[in-house]
Amino acid sequence: MKSSNGPKQQIFSHLAEIAAALAHPHRIEILELIAQGERSVEDLAERIGLSLSNTSRHLQVLRRARLAAPRREGKNMFYSLVSETEVVTLLASLGRVGERNIAEIDQVLQSYFRTRDSLEPVSRSALLERLRDGSVTLLDVRPPEEFARGHLPGALNISLDQLDAALGDFTENIPVVAYCRGPYCVLSYDAVAQLRARGVQATRLEDGYPEWKAAGLPVET
């Protein structure tokens, strides 16, 4: 007689807890945010547009699934990823499965992302080579506090509303590669469109800072 609570079933039960923790868009967004670096509950609530109580409830679910871990500092609670590389890889795999199998995701990619930039993004390996020979300007368009927690080597941190004023920082014959939080972060798409409209050669990195770091590539803080 097959056991309903054998070792395999116990493992599957715990894996199901992880899958259940991912089964809400706000929790996936929280993971994307804390993949940039540790954040307070208040900061997460403000960025996601939820109340503190709702944000705390989502964080508790992620905590029970061992996807996020808290750290108390005085009266404030901060959260970061547990097993950062594995969680970032899990989210990337989830995105690839969704893109391949869910037509609605492909429609969003076509109607929003690919209409903004139909050019092939730069791979991590190609960018690494360009950084080594100095043939590219690297642009990080995330908020300054995320940039301060960690960024790609030699990156400039310029927000979208400052790009026009910073055009003098870009050399005409050196292309720009922009990146932000991950493959679905619209900031890099908007930055590339804005730069191209001003005559600057610009393209995107294929994903973002968390994926670069998870791949074991060099970062600066």
Image (spheres, rainbow, N blue to C red):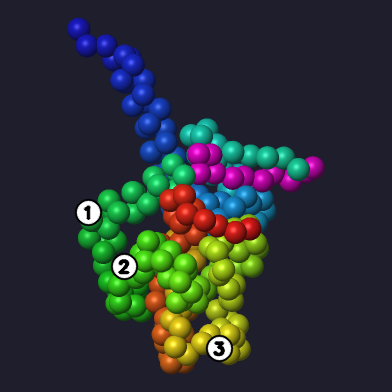
**Badge 2 vs badge 1, beta-carbon distance below 8 Å:** no
Q: In which quarter of the image is the C terminus?
A: bottom right
Q: Nearer the viewer, mark 2 or mark 3?
A: 3
Measuring from the top left, give residue 105's x and y in whole percent. Answer: 29, 61
For marks 3 and 1, give the CA distance: 40 Å
Residue 112 image offset from top left, x and y in percent: 34, 74
Name the residue: 29% across, 77% down. Answer: 118
Residue 126 on the magenta segment: no
Residue 108: give its label: 2
Q: Helix, strand, or loop for circle 1?
A: helix
Instruction: Give the number of marks.
Output: 3
Left or right, residue 139 beside residue 2: right
- Disc 2 marks a residue whose amino acid type is Val
Tell me where residue 123 appears, x and y as whole percent: 36, 64
The residue nearer to you, when weighing 78 against 124, is: 124
Amino acid carrying label 3: it is Leu
The answer to whether residue 82 is above or below residue 6 is below
The front one of 114 and 138 is 138
Of all residues, the one furthest to the right in this rendering is 74
Using a 10 Å C-alpha cutoff, classify the residue at mark 1 as few (fewer than 14 neighbours), some (14 to 19) or many (20 or more). Answer: few
Q: Quadrant of the N terminus?
A: top left
Name the residue: 22% across, 11% down. Answer: 2
Q: Which of marks 3 and 1 is nearer the N terminus?
A: 1
Q: Going 48% across and 34% down the picture, which residue do you hit?
A: 65
Residue corresponding to mark 1:
101
Comparing 40 with 155, the one in front is 155
Answer whether residue 33 is visible to the viewer in this image: no
Residue stretch rendered in magenta on the structure? 74-84
Residue 78 lies in the magenta-colored region: yes
User: What residue would you read off at disc 3?
Assistant: 167
In whole angstroms, how far apart are the C-alphas of marks 2 and 3?
31 Å
